[in-house]
Every structure is written in C-alpha cells, then in structure tokens.
Image (cartoon, grey):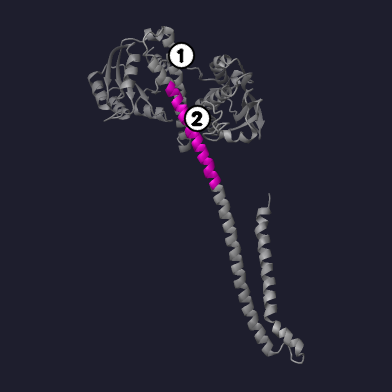
Amino acid sequence: MNNTGLMNPIIKSKMSLLKTLILIVIIVFFSNVNAFVDYFIHPEIPFFDKEHLIVGFITGIFSVILSLIILFYINRLQNINIEHNNLLKELSQAKQTAEDNNRLKSAFLANMSHEIRTPMNGILGFAGLLKTHGLTGEEQQEYIRIIEKSGVRMLNIINDIIDISKIESGLMKVDMKESNVNEQIEYIYTFFKPEVEAKGMQLSFKNTLPSNKAIIKTDREKFYAILTNLVKNAIKYTYTGTIELGYNLIQKQNSEFLQFFVKDSGTGIPKDRQNAIFERFVQVDICDKKVQQGAGLGLAITKSYIEMLGGTIWVDSEEGKGSTFFFIIPYNAELEVNSTLKNPVPSVKVWNQVKNLKILIAEDDEVSDNLISNMAQKFGEKIFNVRTGIEAVEVCHTNPDLDLILMDIQMPEMGGYEATQQIRLFNKEVIIIAQTANGLSGDKAKCVEAGCNDYIAKPIMKDEFMSLLQKYFN
C-alpha cells in the first residue's frame, strides 16, 4: 500500500509547527531586544530582576498572540491561494469536458441525422420510383429490396437508441437460460457468411468444446447481440482478407471462463482511440471524415451486455493490420440439453394448413391495421377490425367462437392490457397475441400477465408472424 498520500499531510503539519515555533522565537527575541541591549550597556543592573521579568513576560505574551495572528493570516492566504489554484484547475477541466461533450454531441447529432436521413432517402425515394409507369418486374423487385434494406437499417438505429436508453435507465434485465454457444456461433457464421463472401472475404469459426460441454447458463439474446455486434463491426471495417470468430476455455483466478474472440484483417484502431470506442456515440473516426454507417452505439451496448453477464471486453489492434476483440464470460457448464436455440422456420405449407380462422384485429393505426389484415386474410375466414379496446371486448362478447385476437397494446379509450383482462373474464380459450411498438424489456411478461398467449413486436415480419400461427394453430 502506498502511504505517500497519508504522510504528506503529517509532514506538512510538522513543517507548519516548526515554522510557527521559529516565528515565535524570532518575534520574542526582537520584542525583548531592548532588554538585551540594556543588559550589555548596564551590566550592573540584574537582567532577571522583577521589572525585566514582568516586561519580558508581557512582551512575550503579546509577541505570541501577534505571531499567532500573523501565522493565521499567512495560513489563510496560503489556503486561499491553494483553493484558487484548485478552482482554476477544476474550471479548466470543466471547460475541457464541456468542449469534449459539445464536440461529441455535435458529431453524434450530425451522425444521427445522416443515419436517419440516409435510409429514409432509400425508403421514400424508391417508393416514389415504384409509381413510375412502365417498370419491369425486375426493377420493381430491386426497388422493393432497397426499401426493405433501408427499413432494416433504420430499425437497427432505433433499436440501438432504445437499448442504450434501457441500459442507462436501469430497465435492462438479464434472463439467464441454457444456451449452446456452439450453436450460437454456427448460426451467426451461417447468417453472415453470404455478406462476408459478397465482399470477397472469408468468414470462419472455431468451436473448441464438444456440443455437450458447450451448454452454459447465460442470457441468450444478449449473448447473441454481443457476437452479432462484434461481427457486424468487423464486416464494417474490413475490406479484404478474413474474419474469424470463436472461443477458448481458460482459467482465471481459480475459475473457468469462456474467452471469445472476433478477429479481422481490417483497418485497425489507433492506439489513442482504443479505449474511446467503447464509449457511447463514439466511432473510431469522430471527425466526420470517414465515419461509417451506424450510430456509434454498438460497442457501448456490447460492453454493457458483457458486464451484465459478469464478463469484460478488450481489444488488441494495430492500425492498418486489423483488430481482435476479446471478451470473457463465466463458464457455467450444463450437463444436459433441454432446449434448442433454433427458432422454428415456418414452412410454405403453413399458409395452406392454417385456414378458416375467425380473427379479431384490434389496432388503432390505419397502416398497421392494413398490414396485419393483408397478412391475415390468407388464412382468415372472417376478420373483424376495431380501433379501441372497448370495441374489442364488445366483438368478443358477440362472437364467442373467435379463434385469434391480435391485440394492440396502446389504443384510445381502453388499452390492450385492460381489454385482454376483461376478455379473459368470459373467454379463456381464444388465442390472444399482443402486438406493440414499445419494444421495452419486460413487455412480453406484462402481456402474459394480462392474459395474452404471446407477444410480437412491431414492425411485424411475415416469417415471425407465421411462426406464431404455426405454434398455436398447426
């Protein structure tokens, strides 16, 4: 333990006491100099007579009082000077922090404006071009593909902002379940392989544990988001060469951890920026010269997720030669696999298998209602459309044979939670699927608690929608 910080105040205190004693001696000496001179001029007069003692005693008291007053003001001036210097230092640091924050804010706002306007340009621009007469079927499909791609990009930005808001507000919760890390990595490899190969690069993975030992207790969604963010980051900053992801089992402080890595041969990160990249709204190049697609939130979210899972993250990078991101999480091995990570992918046959359903769509937004109605009409025999929770309850009263209710959570007059609770009082069999644009953690639990069977978040995708139908009606 370093005691320098504790010893400094003691040393300063002793020095101040020594100075005080020296000052008192000097003052007492000069205050009684007349008595000393008188003694040497008139040696016949006793120096320690009554008169000299009284005068010396009184003079000494006044000298001590005077020296203490002088010392008090000297110390006071020194303290004022120290406080002044500290205040100047704090003001200088605050000024620097304010300038840095202002620079970050300006860069973030400029980047967010770019990130929102760019996909909107693709969505609105190509939606307008779809109105052009004489387009070929191939051109129409290309325009639709661009609109979908732009929509996904905007949704990613919105999701990042929501995630970072949930993290900062403490709403983000950890849901620990069995997860097979081998399957997660293989799934991510399969998902990103076409995108990497489209750039003329190679993607590979390394699973070091057998499948039966690769089962751990962790938050599947956050673990998936961590790997996804790191691989997407590698793809973004790599233009030639390879990207590799994998893990190794390591020992650290008498505990076992899984150390994951995502390695790329990309542009690399300057040494002075390697800590800053994990901060919110920061990219490698914040000066707006080479800013890449994204809000600069991915690594900050990744770092927060890893810390929630009990791990840490760091980067080993050299500019121009690539980067390797490492992170560790506890290795809590499970002996048996009771669940699978693979989501059911709806077959085309589901469209034909699920038919003749009686469906109620409770949705106050016209566009969303139109979208869901178009999806539902392929397998619905009769569809009811309502705009409020009160209307939804009334339709359920008059139609007890409903098969499915797609319940919007936020509606005027009566919301989806209350409407579901009232419906469950007289109909416990109908399948109720909540559909909402909130997207906050805990929403699904709230929906189930209110009486819903399941939950789907907007924007509603066809495959996800069909998976739910397959789950309840196949």
Determine whether 419 is above or below 94 in the image. above
Could you tell me which residue is drawn at 59 percent across and 62 percent down? 79
Determine whether 229 is above or below 103 in the image. above
**Label 2 neighbourhood size at 10 Å, few (<14), some (14-19), many (20+)?**
many
Determine whether 348 is above or below 429 in the image. above
**Label 1 neighbourhood size at 10 Å, few (<14), some (14-19), many (20+)?**
few
Label 1, on which residue? 345
Task: Work out which residue is located at the far left of the displayed protein and give it.
Answer: 398
Q: Is residue 123 visible?
A: yes
Q: Which residues are magenta?
A: 95-121
Query: Left or right of 340: which side holds 369?
Result: left
Q: Amino acid at mark 2?
A: Ala
Query: Left or right of 21: which side holds 128?
Result: left
Could you tell me which residue is drawn at 33 percent across and 25 percent down? 408
Q: Amino acid at mark 1?
A: Val
Label 2, on which residue? 295
The x, y position of residue 323, in whole percent, is 63, 27
